Image (spheres, grey):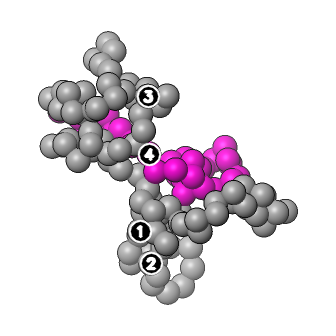
Amino acid sequence: MVMNILKEKTKNNLNNEAVIFDFQKYSIHDGPGIRTIVFIKGCPLSCIWCSNPESQDMKPQVVFFEKNCIDCGKCISICPRSAIKKVSELKIIDRELCDSCGKCADGCPANAMRNCGRGFK
């Protein structure tokens, strides 16, 4: 069943490109041995206990880590689509406006904005 869901969800990905959002080196959990884990975006399962909800969307996206934010405002000023707003001391990313260009993440000095996903063929 899982394979059928995967095939249905990915059949429109004609460019055969994997969007990878993370690598985990020296993984020693979940069994014997040492391994490197590659996390790929586009998981079709949407499990309620998912530890990586950023993996569900197939496209690269920008993620915000509030605890890292130093409130400098660079992300707001650098965003070419004005997709980041400050509302009541919180930074909000308007996903309808954001095209995931990553300029906010590249310009963030505190690593509070990060690019999640990069295409590989």
Q: Extreme bottom residue here?
A: 33
Q: Are marks 4 and 1 in contact (CB under 8 Å)?
A: no
Q: Are marks 2 and 4 in contact (CB under 8 Å)?
A: no
Between discs 3 and 1, the one toward the N terminus = 1
Cα distance between the residues tagged 2 and 3: 35 Å
Which one is nearer the viewer's eye here, 27 or 23?
23
Query: Quick check: 94 left or right of 56?
Result: left
Cα distance between the residues tagged 4 and 1: 16 Å
Between discs 4 and 1, the one toward the N terminus = 1
Between discs 1 and 2, the one toward the N terminus = 1
Q: Which mark is residue 36?
A: 2
Which one is nearer the viewer's eye here, 83 or 1?
83
Please, what is the three-letter code of the amino acid marked with disc 2? Answer: Thr
Eye-nearest disc, 4 or 1: 4
Cα distance between the residues tagged 1 and 2: 7 Å
The residue tagged 1 is: 23
Secondary element at tag 1: strand
- The stretch in magenta equals 41-70
Q: How many marks?
A: 4
Please, what is the three-letter code of the amino acid marked with disc 1? Answer: Phe
The residue tagged 3 is: 97
